[in-house]
């Protein structure tokens, strides 16, 4: 009998321990958990944290409209979390598509699961269509291939944080934060650059999340989509009758792998009414550029431009072969064709100051000849006027 009671006690203790373990995982203190979440009527973000590496857990999110004695699920999403590295906060973003939403209270319910077992769950309540005015207002949001900018207006003096997120699908692939920014009376623009490489012609979303410290630790979030493009600009050019150069500045986190095309045309009349005559064109690859990188590309003409006025066209060609920028300028040369022939390259037929065969240079030969002439003249004069005895 005592043995039977001992076994029953062990079984009961094991059941209590298992129940406690399930509760611990469900309230978010297990290896993988929901650390933070936010939602409004348009979008949501969930921050996950894991004490060990995890692969392909499932995140389930539901937008719920509470009611009297019941609740209504307005929208629901479920997707894989992918790779979760150990001891790293990972943020996932999703978007609601609610048509004609009603004013009132809503709840985001999020659950992190592994093969159907709930590892962690959390809720976030918010109100849509509230008449309470925030201390801040978002006037404009512009993300592009370089970074993101947001214009904020203060309703009253405020202290706040801004999170800038670059979103690819559900994944936040780059995140940076400005802490304890402030506004007092006038709107101001806040900006951040993307610190990661982008893929050309791919769609991303730029997201800002503003945390206002008072009253009530409020949040404002806004997201805009954009398509990443390679981009650069010509910042400086130089040209003369021997060649030209252009300095190119990168303006995108899409690696710029384009080229420069230098084309020269001779202007027949200085009035510009004459039809320009094509002279030559040179194409050179631009070294790979990212935002704020610059490189100078130089080219030389096959032949120096002789006297006259020339038009120089410089085209900056993008990764897809499109013309990003075009510059035009004038080259004025005063080099005459005679000067050109005199300063032309060595053909090997010109006389050399040094005789390659005997090693005697031309100046030595001239000096020797002059010396012999003087000696000859001296003896000739002596023969004409002999000394008397």
Image (cartoon, rainbow, N blue to C red):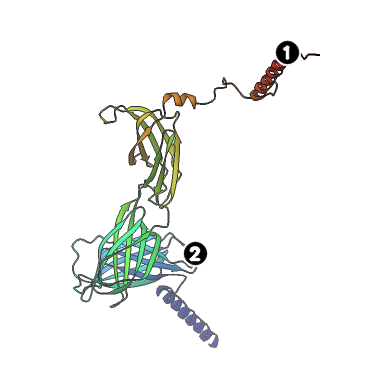
Q: Is residue 141 positioned above or below 270 on the image?
A: below
Tally the marks: 2
Residue 54 % position (x, y): 47, 63
For this rendering, which residue is in front, 204 or 187?
187
Residue 334 % position (x, y): 39, 31
Q: Is residue 296 positioned above or below 49 on the image?
A: above
Residue placed under numbered mark 1 in the picture: 385
Q: Quadrant of residue 39?
A: bottom left
Residue 194 % position (x, y): 39, 57
Q: Is residue 97 left or right of residue 260?
A: left
Q: Element under label 1?
A: loop
Residue placed under numbered mark 2 in the picture: 53
Residue found at the far right of this picture = 389
Q: Residues within 10 Å of mark 2 (few under 14, many from 20)?
A: some
For this rendering, which residue is in front, 243 or 191?
243
Gap in angstroms between the C-alphas marked 2 and 1: 119 Å
Residue 353 % position (x, y): 62, 24
Q: Quadrant of residue 75?
A: bottom left
Which of pointers 2 and 1 lies earlier in the amino acid sequence?
A: 2
Q: Residue drawn at (52%, 26%), measured in percent from left and top?
A: 345
Q: Is residue 77 positioned above or below 228 on the image?
A: below
Q: Is residue 283 positioned above or below 165 on the image?
A: above
Label drawn at residue 313? none
């Amino acid at each position: 009998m005592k043995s039977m009671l001992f076994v029953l006690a062990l079984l009961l203790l094991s059941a209590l321990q298992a129940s406690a373990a399930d509760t611990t995982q469900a309230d978010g203190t297990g290896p993988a958990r929901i650390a933070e979440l936010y939602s409004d009527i348009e979008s949501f973000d969930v921050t996950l944290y894991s004490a060990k590496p995890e692969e392909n857990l499932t995140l389930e999110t539901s937008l719920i409209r509470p009611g009297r004695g019941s609740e209504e699920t307005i929208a629901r999403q479920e997707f894989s979390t992918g790779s979760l590295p150990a001891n790293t906060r990972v943020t996932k973003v999703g978007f609601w598509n609610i048509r004609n939403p009603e004013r009132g209270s809503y709840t985001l319910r999020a659950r992190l699961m592994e093969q159907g077992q709930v590892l962690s769950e959390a809720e976030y309540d918010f109100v849509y269509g509230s008449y309470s005015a925030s201390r801040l207002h978002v006037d404009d949001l512009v993300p592009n291939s370089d970074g993101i900018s947001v214009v904020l207006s203060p309703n009253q003096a405020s202290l706040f944080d801004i999170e800038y997120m670059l979103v690819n699908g559900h994944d936040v692939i780059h995140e940076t934060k400005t802490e304890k920014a402030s506004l007092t009376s006038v709107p101001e623009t806040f900006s951040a650059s993307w610190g990661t490489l982008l893929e050309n012609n791919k769609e991303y979303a730029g997201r800002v999340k503003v945390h206002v410290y008072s009253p009530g630790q409020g949040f404002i979030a806004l997201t805009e989509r954009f398509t990443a493009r390679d981009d650069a600009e010509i910042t400086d050019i130089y040209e003369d009758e021997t060649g030209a150069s252009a300095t190119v500045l990168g303006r995108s986190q899409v690696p710029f792998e384009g080229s420069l095309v230098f084309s020269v045309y001779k202007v027949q009349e200085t009035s510009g009414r004459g039809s320009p005559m094509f002279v030559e064109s040179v194409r050179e690859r631009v070294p790979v550029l990212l935002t704020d990188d610059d490189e100078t590309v130089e080219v030389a003409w096959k032949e120096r431009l002789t006297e006259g006025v020339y038009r120089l066209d410089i085209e900056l060609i993008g990764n897809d072969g499109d013309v990003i920028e075009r510059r035009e300028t004038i080259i004025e040369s005063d080099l005459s064709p005679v000067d050109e022939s005199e300063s032309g390259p060595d053909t090997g037929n010109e006389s050399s100051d040094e005789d390659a065969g005997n090693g005697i240079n031309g100046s030595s030969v001239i000096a020797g000849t002059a010396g012999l002439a003087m000696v000859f003249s001296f003896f000739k004069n002596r023969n004409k006027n002999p000394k008397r005895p």
